[in-house]
Amino acid sequence: MKKLTLMLACGASLFAASAQAQVMIDMRRVTCADYLAMPAADALLASAWLSGWFNQKAGYTTVDFKAFQRNVESVTTWCGSNPNETLMNGLQRATAPK
């Protein structure tokens, strides 16, 4: 009986873990106004994701935390002047080869 109870408890915990909701966000639709309205923790996560995505596209394999902080400040300032611009479009234009 103890084995059955233990197996059921393990099975239930696996089922519960797989039932957790995931949030999907279409980053192409996030505007600067959306970005600026995010709580600080969420904005930092979004910034880290965007930084990783753009750095991978550019072929960078290192992490520069000072450059990351400068980039976040720059994007935040730019977004303050362009609240209706989508974040991805603005970042793609800023990082496009010249």
Image: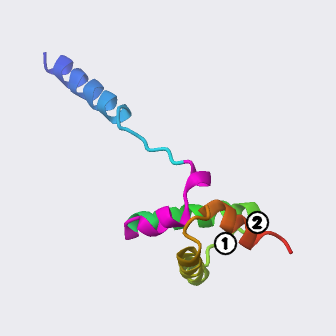
Residue 84 percent across, percent down from the top left? 57, 64
Name the secondary structure under disc 2: helix
> Badge 1: how crowded within 10 Å, few (<14), some, or many (20+)?
few
Residue topped by disc 2:
58
| Labels 1, 2: front one | 2
Distance from the alpha carbon under mark 1 to that under mark 2? 11 Å
At a point 59% along the width and 72% down the height, the residue shown is 82
Taking depth in this image into account, of 34 and 16 the one nearest to the observer is 34
User: What secondary structure is the stretch in magenta mostly built from?
Assistant: helix
Which residue appears farthest toward the right when viewing the image? 98
| Residue ID for mark 1 | 62
**In the image, is residue 29 part of the stretch drawn in magenta?**
yes
Q: Hey, what amino acid is under mark 2?
A: Ala
Q: Which region of the structure is painted magenta? A: 26-40
Q: Which amino acid does label 1 sit on?
A: Thr
| Outermost left residue | 1
